[in-house]
Amino acid sequence: MKGTMEASPIAGDWTDDVVYSNLGYLVPSLLAPEPLGAALVGMAGMLLCLGSAAYHATYARWAQRLDVAGMLTFVPAVVAAIAAPWSPWVYVGVPLASVFYWVYAWRINSFYHVPAWVLLGTVLLAVQVGGWALVPAGLFVLAGIVRVWIEPDSDSWWHSVWHLLGAAAAGAALVLL
């Protein structure tokens, strides 16, 4: 029976802290200033939470794709919520981005795409709240330092810190609106 469990695509360590730190991605939706933004950030956060949790529990290729596509959907959803005061039509881009990043997950370098989205979100936020936009930007930079320079391993306590800092950056951006 043990061999059967190991062959299962969902077998893994579902108790690891790196799995549960993904719950942080659900919090920013509670801080969105309006219902449509909250719904889209919440759905993107759920996709990221479930995809990243599955990846960190199983380290399977299918789950990694969910993790990558989830991350690359969550960040544009937050940026759309930041841009929504100018036009709610920006929300149309969230499902389009999600499909794009799902299809091209293995051709996209998230080390470029995520910072580019964050830069756009920071500029849009700065137009609305001025220098306060540096607070979520600073949290994002700190998350990047943790991810790239302190501990690039995706199965460590530091990776959990990276998840929580990323969620905090998104939440800080939305609470400023």
Image (cartoon, rainbow, N blue to C red):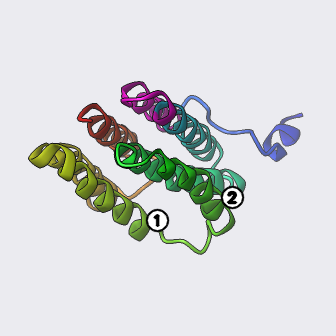
Report the residue marked by disc 2: 61
x and y, in percent, of residue 15 in the image: 56, 28
x and y, in percent, of residue 55 in the image: 61, 47
Secondary structure of residue under mark 1: helix
Report the residue marked by disc 1: 110
Furthest-bottom residue in this view: 107
Q: Is residue 23 magenta?
A: yes
Query: Closer to the observer: label 2 or label 1?
Result: 1
Secondary structure predominantly adopted by residues drawn in magenta:
helix
x and y, in percent, of residue 130 in the image: 12, 47
Residue at figure coordinates x 55%, y 43% from the top left: 48
Region in magenta: 18-37
Label 2 Cα crowd, 10 Å radius (few <14 / some 14-19 / many 20+): few
Secondary structure of residue under mark 2: helix
> Which of 177 and 163 lies nearest the eye of the viewer?
177
Q: Quadrant of the N terminus?
A: top right
Furthest-left residue in this view: 131
Say whether residue 12 is left or right of residue 72: right
Q: Is residue 137 magenta?
A: no
Position above or below: 41 against 105:
above
- Residue type at mark 1? Ser
